[in-house]
Image: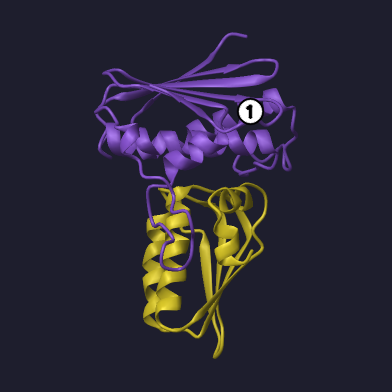
Chain colours: A purple, B yellow
Amino acid sequence: MAPIRLIVPGTLRYRDVAVRIVAEAARLVSCSSRRAPNDPLDHDVRDPFDTAVVSAFMEIFNNVSIHAYQRVGGGPIEIAITPGERQLVIELKDHGRPFDIDAVAPLPAELDVNTLPEGGMGIHIAKTMLDEIGYEPGPPNLWRLCKRLPGGANAVTRI
Amino acid sequence: MPSPAFDVQRSDSVTTLLVRGSLDINTAPQLADEIDRVIAARPSHVIVDLSALDLIDSSGVAALVKLYKGVRGTGGAVTVAGARDQPLAIFKLLRMDKVFDI
């Protein structure tokens, strides 16, 4: 299937429109239905496949906007979404600063009120939700996200 | 920028925070201001009602963690209720469902 291509300015202002398109692409693969099919403003992510894709994509879009483009934009995010029969592949290309994925700290082994993290959870969410996640520092920097049906093991990071 | 999607209701014994729609990197900063006000009031019990929350990202989780730590730090209790679908999946992935007792 040909990829769905979307180019948005690299700021958080355009995040929501990208998320909605990714959610619809996930539904093409999972064949899940919307709770409110006539309400384009309804956030409707219930299917586990859709949940994984949307959750991971939101975190990587955040990462690009914050780290690559330093919250001020200055370049595009080029998104290619390729639905397959049993998988969805999303590539995000940016022209900002490279990100050091190895510098991301893991979650604490034991969580309690003292160790609950208030940051640094985004990459962990994306890695755990996906079957594969790849990052090639540039510029251009390239993220490649892959989720397969049904479910799957934790992500393999390819750098 | 999305509108704030939360309500706060206060009674003598309980403060209830209802969060709707998407709690994410764009909306969490607005909730953070309200969270600061809730913590400053030193409530004895805060109920976070997530039954109308459809989406959350790590920034939204961080805001709720800040609320949890802040209220607990002043001797109060926090109950997180109603999480479903994607937000519940995120809490489970981060193992916060145990901490929040969801």
Where residue B37 sits, quadrant-wise, is bottom left
Chain of the residue under the numbered disc 1 shown in the image:
A
Q: Residue furthest top?
A: A2
Q: Residue at x 70, y 15 (%)?
A: A85
Total of numbered circles in the picture? 1
Evaluate whether residue A76 shows in this view.
Answer: yes
Evaluate whether residue A16 shows in this view.
Answer: no
Q: Position of residue B24 (x, y in %)?
A: 46, 49
Please name whichever residue, B40 or A122, is drawn nearer the observer in this view of the structure. Answer: A122
Q: Position of residue A118 (x, y in %)?
A: 39, 57
Q: Which residue is mark 1?
A: A26
Q: Residue at x 49, y 47 (%)?
A: B57
Q: Position of residue B27 (x, y in %)?
A: 43, 53
Tell whether B30 sits left or right of A18: left
Please name whichever residue, A80 or A149, is drawn nearer the observer in this view of the structure. Answer: A149
Q: Residue at x 42, y 84 (%)?
A: B42
Q: Residue furthest front?
A: A109
Query: What amino acid is at disc 1?
Result: Ala
Where residue A89 sits, quadrant-wise, is top right
Please name whichever residue, A68 or A11, is drawn nearer the observer in this view of the structure. Answer: A68
Question: Residue A155, relative to residue A66: is it above or below?
Answer: above
Question: Residue A136, relative to residue A155: is it above or below?
Answer: above
Q: Residue at x 33, y 34 (%)?
A: A102
Mark 1 Cα shell of 10 Å, populated few (<14), some (14-19), many (≥20): many
Tell whether A9 sits left or right of A70: right
The quadrant of the image that shows the C terminus of chain B is: bottom right
Where residue B13 sits, quadrant-wise, is bottom right
Q: Position of residue A28 (x, y in %)?
A: 68, 23
